[in-house]
Amino acid sequence: MSISDSSSAFTDFVLNKISPEVRNSLTTEQLNEIENAIAAGSPLEKHPIDVRGMIPLFFAKFYFVFLLGRDKRTNTRNTEKGRRKEGDLFASTFFFLFFTLPLILLFFSVLYIIKSELGIDVFPNSHLLDMLDI
């Protein structure tokens, strides 16, 4: 059995990575078993929509892959869900510290300025600037 007879491009890739001396020393049965082992690691069902392409530019080639189908990766989904929770916690903390907290400080500063302009003394004979020693 020659390597070019194999049905999978990935199998061809893996077998071509084996040195020619070792590859030529393998029997047909050994090659079949290697191909079966590689095929066992690939998904059994293909995606209903599988679009792949290449965009050649002058300076580089870019490829694209568009796969569409039902998600059957429960372990991966659980891992992604945990990562999303951590990311959401980080994003919430970041949003609070860098957006909400300054808005709250601005709100209280505006309230203080309005209170001062109206002449309302919550604590008579003491002012914020006197307490800050600026």
Image: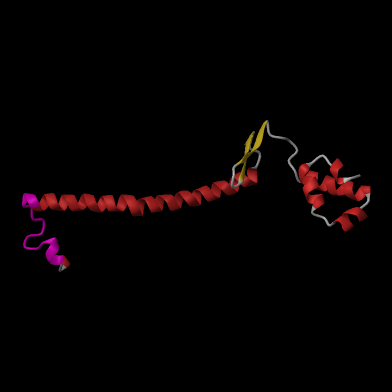
Prevailing secondary structure class for the magenta stretch in the rendered image: loop
Residue in front for this viewpoint, 7 or 79: 7
Relative to 39, is 75 on the left or the right? left
Q: Is residue 121 magenta?
A: yes
Residue in front for this viewpoint, 68 or 79: 68
Relative to 96, is 33 on the left or the right? right
Residue 89: give x, y in percent of width and height: 45, 51
The residue lying furthest to the top in this view is 48
Using the image, determine if residue 71 lies above or below residue 125. Answer: above
Q: Quadrant of the C terminus?
A: bottom left
Residue 61: give x, y in percent of width and height: 62, 44
The range drawn in magenta is 117-131
Residue in front for this viewpoint, 115 or 24: 24
Residue 57: give x, y in percent of width and height: 59, 42
Q: How is the image coloured?
A: secondary structure
Q: Residue at x 79, y 44 (%)?
A: 39
Q: Residue at x 31, y 50 (%)?
A: 100
Q: Quadrant of the N terminus?
A: top right
Q: Residue at x 11, y 61 (%)?
A: 127
Using the image, determine if residue 75 lies above or below residue 50. Answer: below
Q: Is residue 120 magenta?
A: yes
The residue lying furthest to the front in this view is 58
Q: Residue at x 19, y 53 (%)?
A: 109
Q: How many labels sit on residues?
A: 0
